[in-house]
Every structure is written in C-alpha cells, then in structure tokens.
Amino acid sequence: MDSKHRPYRMCIGCRKARPKDELLRFVKSDEGQAVFDADCSRGGRGFYLCPGPACFEQAHRNRKTRAAYFRTRDTVREAIVEIQETILKFIEKDLILCKKTGYLGDARDEETPPGESELVLVAAERSPEEKGEMHTAAHSSQTRIFSLPASLGGPAGCCAAVRKGFPLANRLAMNLQKYEMLSSKGPAL
Ligand SMILES: [Zn+2]
C-alpha cells in the first residue's frame, strides 16, 4: 500500500498518530454514547484508539475520554471484551465468504503453501513445532500470519490459508491484528 496516501489518525489514549486502518474507530450516537464503528461505515465525527489494553487504560484515566466512552462500562476489560466480540463477528463473516468464494485453503496443503497465500491463520491448539514451521514458512515468503481466534477453530480451521486475490484480505488481516492486540496482556487491568 502506498504509505503517502495512507491516512493517519491520532489515538486518544497514547496521542500518537497511526495508520487509520490499524486503529479502532468510535462515533458518538444521538444519545451522546460512543459506539464502536467496526467497519468505519458510520458517519459523523469519530475518535480513535489503538487496539491495545494500554491505550484503553489511558483513555479510561482521562476524565474527558472516560466520559465519552466508558460512561456505561465499568472497566476497561468490559469495553475490550465487547469490541473483541464485534471484531470476531467480522472475522467470522469474512472467513465464511472466503470459503464460499473458494479462497480458503489449508496452509499445510501442497496446493496453498504460505508463499501462495495472502494470509495464514494458525489455530491456537496446534503444537509449538507446527506453529514454528508455519511461522518460518510464512516469514520467508513474507506472508502475514495470525493466530486463529479459538472460537473459530472448527474442523477445517487448523491452519487456514487465505489465497492471494481474496478481495477482503486486508480487512480480514486488520481485524485479526486488532483482535490479537486486544487479546495481549497490557498493564494490570
Ligand atoms: Zn494509542
């Protein structure tokens, strides 16, 4: 992607600018509540947060941003869980579409080795050796690799490969990245 034309936005937690598609977007509803805008489809003024627990914590500590976003949520964890559930639905939807359109394969299959794939998704329950092999193969072919959220494992989801050309690959990758970052342990919550 051309970085010159990649829009940047500031996170209200850490106050750093990051590419817009790597951030979580929120908009104010008519009632003045902040609503998570998962696919950036809602109009109106929004604000952004990095998908990491540390930035949520910072936004929660700030009186103004707490009033905007955390008013109906007791804890940062509550807010994060809610957002993760929403993101997970998007990931699931895109994976179903990926399968239906024939872009989903198995990364251990000869047909879709990491080099022929846009993304590789490794299920958490795979053995460390298998994960290691997948990571090595993906890195050497510069394929983006993510862990497959546990609830999406399924029988065929052990080491999923999204074939090159899947139109929603980037959105899927961004959501997987956000999900992973939200799952990582930040400072004690
Ligand atoms: Zn941030």
Image (tube, rainbow, N blue to C red):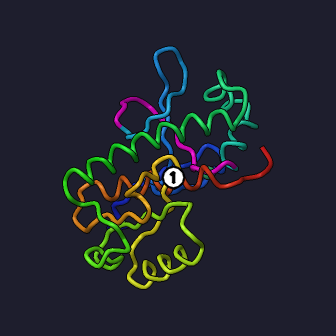
- The furthest residue to the top: 31
The residue stretch that appears in magenta: 41-53
Residue 145 relative to residue 187: left or right = left
How crowded pointer 1 is (Cα within 10 Å; few <14, some 14-19, many 20+) is rated as some
Rendering quarter of residue 144:
bottom left
- The furthest residue to the front: 155
Could you tell me residue 35's position as x and y percent? 50, 28
Quadrant containing the C terminus is top right
Residue 22 relative to residue 4: left or right = right
Q: Is mark 1 within 8 Å of ligand 1?
A: no
Residue 1 against residue 50 in the figure, above or below? below
Viewer-proximal residue, 2 or 171?
171
Please name the residue shown 22% across and 50% down the image.
100
Q: Where is mark 1, residue-wise?
A: 149
| Dot 1 amino acid type | Pro
Q: Is residue 129 magenta?
A: no
Could you tell me residue 185's position as x and y percent? 70, 54
Residue 152 against residue 159 in the figure, above or below? above
